[in-house]
Amino acid sequence: MNQKPIHKAIDMKKGQKLPLTIKRLGINGEGVGYFKKQVVFVPGALPNEEVVAEVTKVNQRFAEAKVVKIRKRSKERIDPPCPVYDQCGGCQLQHMNYHATLREKRDMVRQAFERHTKLNMNQLVIHDTIGMEDPWDYRNKSQLQVAKRGEEVIAGLYAMNSHKLIDLTECKVQHQSTNKVTEVVKQILSDLNVPIYNERKHKGVIRTIVTRVGFETGQVQVVLVTKEEELPRKDAIISEIQKRLPEVTSIIQNVNGQKTSIIFGEKTVHLAGEEVIEEKLGDLSFTLSARAFFQLNPTQTVKLYNVVKRAAALTGKEKVVDAYCGVGTIGLWLANEAAEVRGMDVIEASIKDARVNAKNHGFHHVSYEVGKAETLLPRWQKDGWKPDVVVVDPPRTGCDDKLLQTIIEVKPKRMVYVSCNPSTLAKDVDRLSKKGYKVKSIQPVDMFPWTAQVESVTELVREK
């Protein structure tokens, strides 16, 4: 009878100082070392460094620690250019040479497949990570929580593992337009003395400033997320934004009265300007409403979607499903080389945008439905429609269990899996590989430079 291995209790105490040699980076960008064969995660430490670390937390299977002293410094360590890098928690790798981060991101994908699959690692093709020529100012959207610090209105992100808000006045990975617009909106809210939300007391009005810019069009949308629909000084806020920020073409309010860390509520109110902004990727234009999902790094998105196109290997005869389609970006990218594209998403606003985007490009063989792929695919199959290629781009939690089962039953010849989480990707691929799908290749893409996140495209082919 197979018995599960018994893990020895961690023999470390909080406050204990340990000498460690860092072997690799973990999935969250932290250094990984071993003390008496027990795993210690050390944020801020880099591979091949020798450090003295102080234990901050002891868990059942591992410990966490902070760097007290670096005895041997990595040649790949650099000074982070962001002044609040060590407080904000938005980036995890600004202390590492950029090209080294690309190597480590490929390794994070490899580690996930080693841990969660039974695939032969010697035969698994994982390409080098596709990086950026200039890995700064790349994010097209910022979502900053708002608070009062004395009389000052601040907007930023919460420090790691805390509810201390770090004011982000000049984020180096955000497009400069979003930085500028957020700063001016903060000033307007301060000048007009608009009540700012207090998370602890659940009082006040303005919770979040969301800013999105079209890289190619220059259009900017501002969304004020409020606790209630009543927006004090509404007309004055609109007037001041229009006067001080002529680049803002869309002003929206979203209402979220819940005690939650989720940004958006269900109700959206159009305040002024257009309801949407336009963005271009390559030759395609996209209409984006306030809540619609769109890739945050347009420069790398073009590279990512070209990898998807290569992996889909279309000849013009294939029926394609674009699951988790958002505003239809991937499906439209493939449309010229497909016989038919059908997409689905559970967010109705995204599907409305997707339909507009398909119509604007004159694609009559592309259609979108609100719903889940695991519901729609069996219905289509019953009606005699079966996809040749399924493209999935799920959230960090990976594919829905029922969707994987549905794909296994529908048996498309080819599957293209766009992932933002190597662990859930590996688990899903392990299941698919047991049901006749072979991994041809995995291509990591650096969508979020200086963070521990790595996107990847996995090409899966059904073996006969």
Image (cartoon, helix red, strand yellow):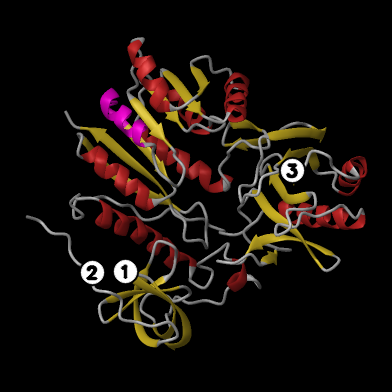
Question: Is residue 134 left or right of 376 when viewed as pictured?
Answer: right
- Count of numbered circles in the view: 3
Task: Name the residue that disc number 3 marks.
Answer: 223
Q: Would residue 135 be found to the left or right of residue 240 on screen?
A: left
Q: Amino acid at mark 2?
A: His
Asked if residue 175 is among those painted magenta in the image, a careful observer would answer no
Q: Which residues are magenta?
A: 401-414
Residue, disc 2:
7
Amino acid at the residue labelled 1: Arg
Label 2–label 1 contact, CB within 8 A: yes
Please tell me whether residue 323 is drawn above or below residue 124 in the rendered image: above
Q: Earlier in the sequence, mark 3 or mark 2?
A: 2
Q: How packed is label 1: few (under 14 Cα within 10 Å), some, or many (20 or more)?
A: few
Q: Position of residue 257 (x, y in %)?
A: 71, 43
Q: In this rendering, which labeled residue sits more in front, label 3 or label 2?
A: 2
Q: Does the image show residue 13?
A: yes
